[in-house]
Image: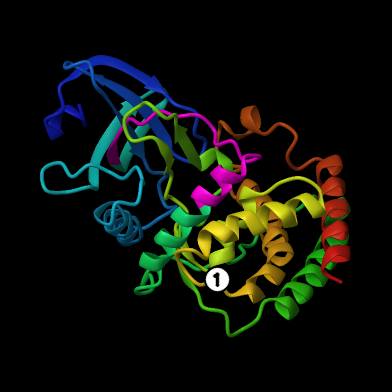
Amino acid sequence: DALSELGLAVDGRLSALSSYENRVYLAHLDDDSSVVAKFYRPARWTEAQIREEHSFTAELVAEDIPVVGPLVLNSMSLHEARVVHDGVDGHFWFSVSPRRGGRAPELDDPEVLMWIGRLMARMHLIGERHAFSVRPALNLHTFQIAEEVKQQWLSLCDQALALVKQQMPAELKWLRLHGDCHPGNILWTPEGMPEPGPHFVDMDDARMGPAVQDLWMLVHGDTAERRQRMEIVLEGYESVRRFDRRELQCIEPLRTLRIIHYSAWLAGRQDDPAFPMHFPWFGTSDYWRGQCDTLREQIGLMS
């Protein structure tokens, strides 16, 4: 009903897509096309924060950055509806986007890394025009910890965050970012198909931060391989936008923040009835001991 009220002729076929944070559905239309409807998790973002995400995405689309953004329907990109479906009953903000397919990018291919580097630089040229006013910057949240490892974990967090603070130069430029630019949020359309090349999806975590936050998750391998691949990404990036090489020293601190933030994100979802099914291992002593070991490794890398 929510989609029909926007003038979309839904043919009745509705499929839930894989997304824990939001409720996301693939809806087929009478003309054989399809759209993706995203119903935002209540209380995670305010209306103003979602609208700011949409505004940033619209800026990118207007500058021919290949980002899958929400459609403007009835003069709006953000809508509200009561949803009763698949065990869900409540009022949600939602958006509707075109469906775009693609495969994961071949990140072992230097040409692909350079291409993505150029695109990220173009995105950042737009992102640095002005700051977000209501969306957050990279930060941490409080979370619950298993009592038997709580003090050990908190002590390690304190050590890690002290090193993060030391190694994050205060004078670095912060700009609007994708924020969660891992390989799963880049889809690659093969040559020979309409709009070939990469396109970015899921701007849900757009926030303020240093440019390198959108780059470091694109490289993998051992230390030498990551450095080599990052240089290839930067070769493409720097052909479009200047990159402050001091930001490279932020990679391990940013990785550390992501590790801590992910545990916080999981802890903040424990009251969700679906949580135990998706994350049965979370909160166990083994989980927290593993996290402690990972933090020790990060402390070693930053020391």
Q: With 256 as the anchor, is 271 left or right in this view? A: left
- Farthest residue toward the bottom? 171
Left-right relation of 159 to 185: right
Kindly indicate the quadrant of the structure image that contains residue 46. Answer: bottom left
Q: Which residues are magenta?
A: 95-116
Q: Is residue 139 left or right of residue 100?
A: right
- Magenta region includes residue 261: no
Kind of residue indicated by mark 1: Phe
What residue is pinned by disc 1? 243
**Is 171 placed above or below 45 here?**
below
Looking at the picture, tell me which residue is in the foreground, 164 or 260. 164
Tell me, yes or no, if residue 144 can be seen here.
no
Q: Position of residue 258 (x, y in %)?
A: 66, 56
Task: Give the structural element (helix, strand or loop) at label 1.
Answer: loop
Is 211 in front, or is 48? 211
Residue occupying the point 44% across, 54% down: 119
Asked if the stretch drawn in magenta spans residue 99, the answer is: yes
Residue beneath the point at 71% across and 71% down? 249
Q: Residues within 10 Å of mark 1 (few under 14, many from 20)?
A: some
